């Protein structure tokens, strides 16, 4: 599959959502199996700020971003607004639809005040592009005085597939970022895609498994598997042309079954909009519940035996 340009990807977009630079566009408390081996609450705040400069093929996070840098102090106001409305939690995620250490997204002058505000949490989790990791990451951890965890988008360790995503990085870039952050005692998590455009279902499973293996070898301690889904414009076009198909629910199950068996680190599956991956109306909710339980226990329960699915398989093999 040929690579698409920024112009191709942006040109297929619909309108942005209306957002307020003084308010986070969403916030919630979510349970997560923590690094300590317990299920603990996380205060997750989706910050409003300028769009990420990288126009990745699969990304739909631009929908809730601004076109300009938010005013100085605005991000701190967003954090305050959310925390005043959320119950106490030991961990916090500051997700900003891009790169926390991009000064055009979050003004550098705001970082000391943000660090002071979140210093009471055991873990502060932010997201950042591997090529935008530098001294500011270690400086922020020092300012926080607590454990910083940076979520890096690997997406895939398959070089040819990665090149088609317009992410403007290589696996070497990812590895270098991991080394830099680990030397600063910063914890790592990453995002891995299940079935990006241009690959078959079986290739998607194999690439996701190998990508998680690669991430763990780079020192990552937590991997989130994201089934690629339409919603950003260009993927709808690719779906119509046959270049992209949504991954199946059983593919997520296979990736979890394989990677959890290693015991090398935490593996989560992103269940947002998971209904788009459903193919069997009889067993789908049971299988989704099984994956949700695996997220919280890091153990995948017995497979779901579905008569409807077995009958369909028999028909296909006849």
Image (tube, helix red, strand yellow):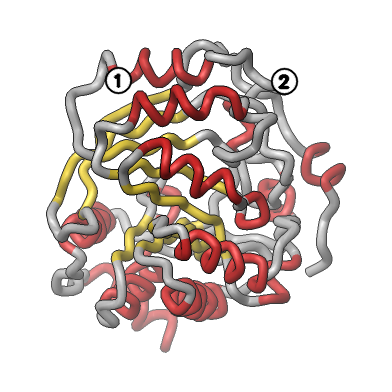
The quarter in which the C terminus is drawn is bottom left
Mark 1 or mark 2, earlier in chain: 2
Whole-angstrom CA distance, mark 1 to mark 2, is 25 Å
Which residue occupies 54% across, 77% down?
Answer: 207
* Residue pointed to by mark 1: 83
Residue 121 at what x, y percent from top left? Answer: 26, 36
Q: Residues within 10 Å of mark 1 (few under 14, many from 20)?
A: many
Which residue occupies 21% across, 43% down?
Answer: 31
Task: In the rendered view, tell whether residue 272 sits above or below residue 50.
Answer: below
* SS category of the residue bearing label 1: helix
Which residue occupies 26% across, 15% down?
Answer: 85
Which residue occupies 30% across, 20% down?
Answer: 83
Question: In the displayed structure, does residue 49 sit left or right of residue 40?
Answer: right
Disc number placed over residue 258 in the picture, else none: none
Q: Quadrant of residue 115?
A: top left
Along the viewing direction, whichever of 166 and 92 lies nearer the viewer: 92
* SS category of the residue bearing label 2: loop
Residue placed furthest toward the bottom = 318
- Report if residue 254 is visible in the image: yes
* Residue pointed to by mark 2: 68
Residue 197 at what x, y percent from top left? Answer: 66, 63
Q: Quadrant of residue 45?
A: top left
- Report if residue 310 is visible in the image: no
Residue 167 at what x, y percent from top left? Answer: 70, 56
Task: In the rendered view, tell whether residue 40 sits above or below residue 80.
Answer: below
Along the viewing direction, whichever of 290 and 148 lies nearer the viewer: 148
The mark tally for this picture is 2
Question: In the displayed structure, does residue 133 sit left or right of residue 152?
Answer: right
């Amino acid at each position: 599959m040929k690579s698409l340009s920024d112009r191709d990807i942006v040109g297929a977009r619909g309108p942005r959502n209306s957002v307020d630079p003084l308010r986070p566009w969403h916030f919630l408390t979510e349970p997560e199996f923590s690094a300590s081996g317990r299920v603990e609450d996380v205060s997750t705040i989706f910050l409003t700020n300028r769009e990420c400069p990288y126009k990745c093929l699969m990304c739909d996070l631009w929908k809730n971003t601004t076109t300009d840098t938010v005013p100085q102090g605005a991000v701190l106001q967003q954090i305050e607004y959310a925390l005043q409305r959320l119950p106490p939690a030991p961990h916090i995620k500051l997700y900003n639809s891009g790169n926390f250490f991009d000064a055009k997204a979050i003004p550098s002058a705001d970082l000391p005040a943000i660090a002071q505000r979140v210093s009471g949490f055991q873990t502060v989790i932010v997201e950042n592009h591997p090529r935008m990791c530098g001294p500011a990451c270690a400086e922020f951890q020092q300012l926080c005085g607590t454990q910083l965890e940076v979520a890096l988008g690997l997406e895939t360790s398959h070089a040819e597939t990665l090149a088609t995503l317009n992410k403007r990085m290589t696996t070497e870039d990812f590895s270098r970022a991991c080394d830099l952050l680990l030397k600063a005692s910063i914890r790592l998590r990453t995002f891995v895609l299940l079935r990006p455009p241009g690959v078959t279902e079986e290739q998607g499973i194999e690439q996701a498994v190998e990508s998680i293996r690669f991430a763990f070898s780079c020192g990552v301690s937590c991997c989130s598997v994201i089934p690629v889904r339409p919603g950003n414009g260009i993927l709808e076009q690719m779906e119509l042309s046959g270049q992209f198909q949504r991954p199946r629910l059983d593919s997520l199950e296979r990736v979890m079954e394989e990677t959890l068996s290693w015991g090398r680190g935490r593996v989560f599956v992103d269940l947002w909009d998971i209904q788009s991956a459903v193919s069997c109306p009889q067993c789908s909710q049971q299988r989704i519940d099984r994956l949700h339980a695996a997220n919280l226990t890091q153990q995948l329960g017995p497979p779901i035996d579905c008569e409807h699915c077995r009958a369909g398989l028999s028909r296909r093999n006849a």
